[in-house]
């Protein structure tokens, strides 16, 4: 390595898989950068992004050096409502594997020039900088924010099991955003060194909304429109409730096509109870207009919007799978039901619709419980896991 160090502190490289904001993973990427800068102000901090965009601009505004570099993914599949063709089905495994090589070579050259003390990769979808760090024996840490296969249905170039094992072997430590993700990783690689670091969620605290006598209860579900996020399940649940004589209004907020959801609601006879809105950067008015939050994902790694709903003063009816039970304690900040069970979800919603006092109790508890995802806790734990303290 030829470049001389010009900083008395550690040089930390943090690598992003995306260049634009639009999900919890990229928000977590920025939170990690801010945490490292706060905990180690003497650090020479470098953010690597795949192209110019919102993330690079925000890093610049935060005073963080940014490098645009090729960071090829090693996984494809469903993301939202989009499906990518599995490349090996078209051209075989070897030609696509070669696509990773320019990213690895670029990372090697960059590391040789800048001599980082450690490298941190955000999400399990991009391997180039992890491989380069391993070759140069630079400590590498991987922040895993997804199950990969079970939540986003990603097809991995080297297979899911082998990919998880490679994540472990390429890293000094794997940092997971929930115990559920950690357990999924360890199930495939028991030797993996892991830590759990819950994300920062510090959206504004709200006041639990009151529901007036005779007023319909209103539920809200936020997330991109896909089968994995459970919008269909929510619509089915309000249909079950209507058949039982209870009308519950449902608001859906997210990215994707509205028509399939409206068609399902029409077919089930609840289109009059459904409101659908596109993506927004300000969920405050939507939280304030609701009485109950929903988390219907079949396998949510963490569920940032679950915490946001609770911080807004809403009890949440969630799915008893993934990382959701780590956020919602049943009977304390909300209620849980089995994944994919519209009848059970409807039963929980109807229980809160019938008992306003219980709904308000859960709302106040949710508001209190959600405040444990503080920035100071996240920042201190991240710096400790990375050996920066």
Image (cartoon, helix red, strand yellow):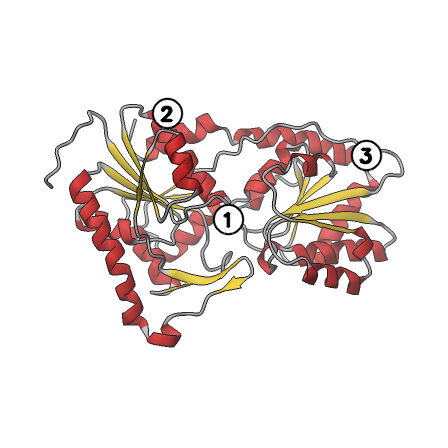
> In this rendering, which labeled residue sits more in front, label 2 or label 3?
2
> In this rendering, which labeled residue sits more in front, label 1 or label 2?
2
Residue 4 is situated, as x and y percent measured from the top left of the image, at 12, 33
Q: Earlier in the sequence, mark 1 or mark 2?
A: 2
Per the image, label 3 sits on a secondary structure element best described as loop
Please state, as top left, top right, bottom left or bottom right, where the N terminus lies in the image. top left
Q: Name the residue under label 3.
A: 211
Q: In this view, does 108 lie to the left or right of 76?
A: left
Q: In this view, does 200 lie to the left or right of 144?
A: right
- Disc marking residue 202: none
Q: Name the residue under label 1.
A: 301
Please state, as top left, top right, bottom left or bottom right, where the C terminus lies in the image. top left
Q: Which residue is drawn at 41% across and 37% down?
A: 57
Q: Earlier in the sequence, mark 2 or mark 3?
A: 2
Q: How crowded is mark 2: few (under 14 residues within 10 Å), some or many (20 or more)?
A: some
Per the image, label 2 sits on a secondary structure element best described as helix
Q: Which residue is drawn at 32% across and 49% down?
A: 192
> In this rendering, which labeled residue sits more in front, label 1 or label 3?
3
| Whether residue 170 can be seen here | no
Q: Residue at x 79, y 31 (%)?
A: 210
Compared to 201, does 42 lie above or below? above
Q: Mark 2 points at which residue?
A: 38
Residue 200 is situated, as x and y percent measured from the top left of the image, at 49, 34
- Separation of residues labelled 1 and 2 (CA atoms): 26 Å
Residue 53 is situated, as x and y percent measured from the top left of the image, at 42, 44
- Separation of residues labelled 1 and 3 (CA atoms): 31 Å
Please report contact status of discs 1 and 2: CB closer than 8 Å, yes or no. no
Between 386 and 10, which is closer to the camera in this rendering?
10
Q: How crowded is mark 1: few (under 14 residues within 10 Å), some or many (20 or more)?
A: many
């Amino acid at each position: 390595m030829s470049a001389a160090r010009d900083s008395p502190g550690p040089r930390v490289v943090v690598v992003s898989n995306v260049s634009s904001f639009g999900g919890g993973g990229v928000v977590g990427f920025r939170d990690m950068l801010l945490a490292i800068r706060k905990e180690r102000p003497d650090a020479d901090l470098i953010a690597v992004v795949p192209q110019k965009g919102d993330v690079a601009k925000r890093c610049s505004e935060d005073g963080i050096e940014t490098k645009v570099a090729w960071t090829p993914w090693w996984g494809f599949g469903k993301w939202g409502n989009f499906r990518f063709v599995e490349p090996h089905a078209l051209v075989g495994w070897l030609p696509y594997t070669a696509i990773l090589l320019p990213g690895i070579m670029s990372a090697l050259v960059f590391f040789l020039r800048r001599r980082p003390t450690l490298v941190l990769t955000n999400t399990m979808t991009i391997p180039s900088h992890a491989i380069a760090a391993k070759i140069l024996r630079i400590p590498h840490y991987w922040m895993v924010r997804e199950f990969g296969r079970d939540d986003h249905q990603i097809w991995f170039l080297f297979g899911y099991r082998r990919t998880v094992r490679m994540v472990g072997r390429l890293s000094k430590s794997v940092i997971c955003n929930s115990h559920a993700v950690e357990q999924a990783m360890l199930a495939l690689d028991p030797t993996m060194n892991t830590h759990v670091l819950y994300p920062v969620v510090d959206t504004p605290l709200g006041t639990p909304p009151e529901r007036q006598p005779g007023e319909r209860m209103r539920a809200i579900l936020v997330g991109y429109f896909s089968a994995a996020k459970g919008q269909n399940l929510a619509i089915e649940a309000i249909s079950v409730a209507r058949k039982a004589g209870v009308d519950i209004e449902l608001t859906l907020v997210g990215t994707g096509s509205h028509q399939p959801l409206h068609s399902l609601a029409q077919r089930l006879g609840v289109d009059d109870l459904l409101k659908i809105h596109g993506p927004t950067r300000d969920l405050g008015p939507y939280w304030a207009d609701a009485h109950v939050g929903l988390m219907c994902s079949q396998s949510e790694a963490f569920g940032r919007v679950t915490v946001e709903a609770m911080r807004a003063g809403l009890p949440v009816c969630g799915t008893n799978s993934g990382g959701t039970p780590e956020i919602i304690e049943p009977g304390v900040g909300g209620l849980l039901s089995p994944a994919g069970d519209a009848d059970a979800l409807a039963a929980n919603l109807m229980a809160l619709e019938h008992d306003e006092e219980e709904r308000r109790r859960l709302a106040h508890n949710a508001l209190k419980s959600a405040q444990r995802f503080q920035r100071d806790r996240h920042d201190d734990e991240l710096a400790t896991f990375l050996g920066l303290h």
